[in-house]
Amino acid sequence: MSPDAIRALLSAMTVPAAWADSSGQIAFANLAFDAWATSYRRASVEEKPDGAWLVALGRAPMPVRAEPLGDGQLVLSAGDGGRVALDAVVTNVVRRLDRVVASVDSTLSAALRERPSDRAVAAIREALSAVEELRGVRRQVLGLAPGVSRPEPQALNLATLTEEALAAMTGPLPIEFGTLAQDCIVRAVREKGFWALAALVGSMSRRLPSEGRIRIDVRTRSHHGQVVLAATNTATEGAEIESARDAVEAAGGRVLIDPDSGVVVEFPLFDTVAAERPSASRGPVLVVDDDPGTLAMMGAVLRRDGFAVMEAENGVAASMILRTHGRSLVALVTDAVLPGRSGVDLAGEARRSLPSLPILIVTGHDEDLVGTSLAPILRKPFQIAEFRAHVQALFSAKGQEP
């Protein structure tokens, strides 16, 4: 988040709130914080085994709550009031984002219906891509408030998730990359995993000596995907473990200390989770959508109909699943516009490597914008019966039973 966005978030909160930068120093605070902790305005946030504390010269340490935010931390009072206020602010911001996205999306769709020139169509497509970026911002904002958003774990490319988390951090990072296994598909909550990895690397970076480095490897080990963080100052790694453990566990993973490797963040591989559904008699179907609600609904309908389901919320993770599990799939259902790689491109990849695979494209945009004849298209929003009928039609058209 930008400094202006952080200031706006703090000013909207009615309880004491501040933001500490990557060094732990309080950089921004609202008026309630100044009134509540006047003598701590120049304090720094320190993470200890029993939680986070405000530490100021000549003052007793004060317990606080510290939540990852951007490349720093949101600092709240230790009571529940801070969480309630944050949930309220997040809800308000998300509603405003929803209104903006809906308005822009509607305006662009109306312009498309006027049969514009090819040049205008290209511009509209670029604008709609920007709308998808706003939806991504919405999901990141929701990730700040677990009380508002409780997303389900999805299939994620662990190497991509790690790179995205580090890209969100500002300033030069004392890191170097080793092996990044691009076929490591894990099951995790994206927003929480994103911020947990960023927070862990940020915490470790602050404790490195001046010339220290963190080596990052992504690998597959014993039914798990692992992000291995090897730092030059191994003596302080226990503190970083405790400060990040809750965040990683909320994302569906766990944190380990490997005496030989360093700090290990571990998530279960996606296919091991899918194998735990022996009751599925049909499938599996790969379902891809960046909207958690739509993804959950389509997956629930397919499971109810006896299919095994593999889920992904972006085109990159879905492409990896196609490469590693494509020959076992009985169908692909994908949104047309996705982060990282479009659903149309994904359908094209599937058609080239798996020419007989039934494909259904769902979209909230006009069919002219989608611009593909690779597969039938189902317009959003749709009813459960309508979705079920389109899926059944995929197999009826090919004269096969899934």
Image (spheres, helix red, strand yellow):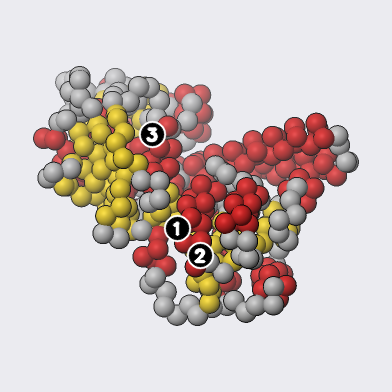
Mark 1 Cα-neighbour bin, 10 Å: few <14, some 14–19, many ≥20:
some
Q: Disc 2 and disc 3: Cα gap in Å?
A: 33 Å
N-terminal label among 3 and 1: 3
Residue 57 horizontal/vertical position (percent): 19, 20
Kind of residue at disc 3: Leu
Q: Is residue 290 left or right of residue 386?
A: left
User: Is 81 in front, or is 177?
Assistant: 177
Residue at numbered disc 1: 324
User: Label for residue 166?
Assistant: 3
Q: Which residue is label 2 attached to?
A: 327
Neighbours of disc 3 within 10 Å: few (<14), some (14-19), many (20+): many
Q: Which label belongs to residue 384?
A: none
The residue lying at 40 percent from left, 37 percent from top is: 163
Q: Which residue is drawn at 38% across and 65% down?
A: 273
Check whether the beta carbons of the residues at disc 3 and disc 1 lie within 8 A of each other: no
Q: Nearer the viewer, residue 247 or 78?
A: 247
Residue 133, quarter of picture: top right
Q: Are marks 2 and 1 in contact (CB under 8 Å)?
A: no
Report the residue that reaches farthest toward the right: 114
Looking at the image, is mark 2 or mark 3 earlier in the sequence? Answer: 3
Q: Where is residue 312 in the image (x, y as percent from the top left)?
A: 51, 55
Q: Which residue is drawn at 75% across and 32% down?
A: 123
Query: Is 40 or 234 nearer to us in this picture?
Result: 234
| 2 vs 3, front mark | 2
Residue 90 x %, y %: 51, 43
Q: Distance between the residues labelled 2 and 1?
A: 8 Å
Amino acid found under the numbered disc labelled 1: Thr
